[in-house]
Amino acid sequence: MICAHLTTLLGFDCTPLDEGGMVAHVSTPFRFADGDAVPVYVEMANGQVRFFDDGHTVMHFTGRGMRLEDGRHTRFLTTAAQAHGATFSDQGDMEAWAPEAQAADAFGRYMAAMLEVCRWEKDQEGASTDVTFLVDEVATALRAWKPTATITENPEFTGISGKPHRLDFLFDGQGVAVATPNPRSASAVLRRLVDIRSAHDNAALPLLVVVDDRADPEGAKREAAILQNVAKVLPFGSLERLALHSAPSVQ
């Protein structure tokens, strides 16, 4: 009885989009933070199957006010795709390909990437829509400060809850998170760091939070006072000065 109605019970539905039935829209129960449906399209051609979003993920975030003008701003989509064997294309599509016989694998990779994006969006709730640009600025400043240091983007750590978390960087042996003065942004970073630090495997990991203090210095100080209970805090203005003083002088 259950098996006969399983797709309905799970909230899945399939609607063909062409006469030959080779392109379809798949409804799923998965949602972005604001309730928008996670886009799933499937196309079959020449023995290959492609699961893709038809650019709707980018449209979702631009509709929420984010600037996704270049690779710096869409890095979180590229990272989510690469982490799960999918691709974020130059045309702005999230997609996963496979031979028809391996369609289930492609679907799994695609959905894992999209759910990673959903998780990223939830973690960023209340943060500045320009947070991805801020992360890029921090990366540039860190490299200028310590040019020979090893820097890894988006390292993943498992918290004591068993939930995986991505920090923005692993820099010179430190886990680095970037935060804005927005209380919800700082709170999301704090929860992530507490979960990471509480896990035995991460107990010795030094943590650094770079807080953007340019637009709201007082707000940055307030959030820094809370964050410094679990990590070293560095205002972005101070990081810029460190980077400037480390830059080689021009003769």
Image (cartoon, rainbow, N blue to C red):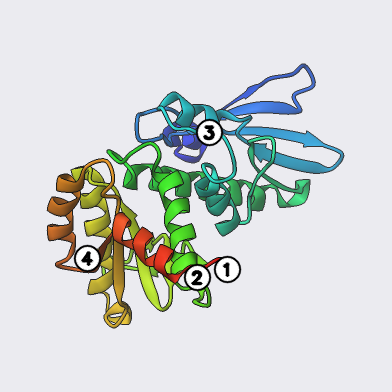
Q: Pick whichever of labels 1 and 2 is earlier in the sequence.
A: 2
Q: What whole-number distance in Å separates the C-alpha atoms at marks 3 and 4?
A: 30 Å
> Looking at the rendering, which quadrant does residue 85 occupy?
bottom right
Q: Which mark is residue 194?
A: 4
> Looking at the rendering, which quadrant does residue 41 occupy?
top right
In the displayed structure image, the side of residue 22 where residue 182 appears, left or right: left
Per the image, the residue denoted by label 2 is 151
Q: What whole-number distance in Å separates the C-alpha atoms at marks 3 and 1?
A: 48 Å
Q: What whole-number distance in Å separates the C-alpha atoms at marks 1 and 2?
A: 29 Å
Look at discs 3 and 1 and give the one toward the viewer: 1
Q: Residues within 10 Å of mark 3 (few under 14, many from 20)?
A: many
Q: Pick whichever of labels 4 and 2 is earlier in the sequence.
A: 2
How many marks on residues? 4
Residue 62 in the image: state x and y as whole percent: 48, 28
Q: Pick whichever of labels 4 and 1 is earlier in the sequence.
A: 4
Q: Pick whichever of labels 3 and 1 is earlier in the sequence.
A: 3
The residue depicted at 65 percent of the width and 42 percent of the height is 95
Callout 1 amino acid: Gln
Per the image, the residue denoted by label 3 is 57
Per the image, the residue denoted by label 1 is 251
Callout 2 amino acid: Ile
Outermost top residue: 19
The relative height of residue 187 versus residue 143 in the rendered view (above or below) is above
Look at discs 2 and 3 and give the one toward the viewer: 2
The residue depicted at 42 percent of the width and 65 percent of the height is 243
The residue depicted at 23 percent of the width and 51 percent of the height is 186
Q: What whole-number distance in Å separates the C-alpha atoms at marks 2 and 3?
A: 28 Å
